[in-house]
Image (cartoon, grey):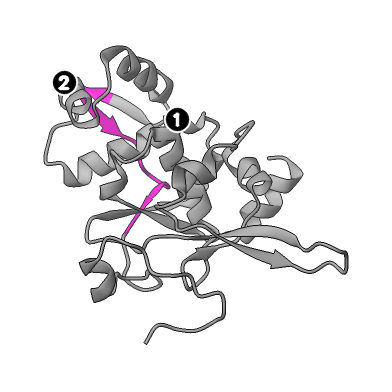
Amino acid sequence: MDILKTKLFAECKCNATINYSMIKKFKPAYIYRFFCLSLFRDEWYNARIKLDELKAMTGDKSLSNFNTTFKEFLDIKPYYIEHGFKYNTRRNVYHIPAKEPKYITLSKDFVDIDLDCKYKGFFIQLILLSKFADIELTKPNIIKELGIDRKTYDKYVKELLGNLVSYDGDRLVLLTDGILLKNEIKGQKILSKRERGGSELPNITLSPKKDK
């Protein structure tokens, strides 16, 4: 790890959750980027991290489209930092959706695996399928569920073979030891009745105020 990534890795949470409902909402690379962002959530599920810092975690060269991609899903809002200069520095706070009934918990050690974002995101999709899709992880089933073509499937699986997946006949076996953790209620925000009944995310609270 480089110096910044090592620093961030030491400061972030030890795990983060991914909801099954995300599986088709975003491309694999963005699912992994969301996981990395979620590692920096606070107890109110807000994450304050600069894109340059997030880029260091994900290994991306650029995250110029990150805010555009997640602008509604993460309910991104600005806040300002005073430095004693004429203009304050603008930063963004990202409100991370609460966990849903179908979710997985992944260790931050997943960050340390040397693979491109899109392959890591694809692996997350495979874990979600294995847990909740009620299918065998065969090539036709995965292609159908994720809406990808055969060429993309072959390319992604080739990158994961021997490291994160293996084959048992025509079925994929996911090697999740040290990555997939047991789900725990403690420390995980649960959707309120208002959140479950509405389509919009709640407004961000920037002051430390616990939900009633």
Image height check: is 144 above or below 77?
Answer: above
Which of the two discs, 2 and 1, labels the residue nearer the N terminus?
A: 1
In the image, residue 159 above or below residue 86: above
According to the picture, the residue beneath numbered tag 2 turns out to be: 140
* Residue 144, percent from left and from top: 17, 26
In the image, residue 26 lies at what x, y percent? 36, 38
> Which residue range is magenta in the image?
167-182
Closer-to-camera residue (181/52): 52
- The quarter of the picture where residue 90 lies is bottom right
Q: Which residue is mark 1?
A: 118
- Viewer-closest of 185 and 64: 64
In the rendered image, the vertical position of residue 192 relative to residue 14, given as above or below: below
Residue at (27% x, 43% y) in the render = 128
- The residue drawn where x is 62% and y is 52% is 9
Instruction: Inspect the magenta stretch and tell me whether residue 20 lies in it.
Output: no
Q: Residue pushed farthest right?
A: 85
Q: Residue at x 19, y 31 (%)?
A: 145
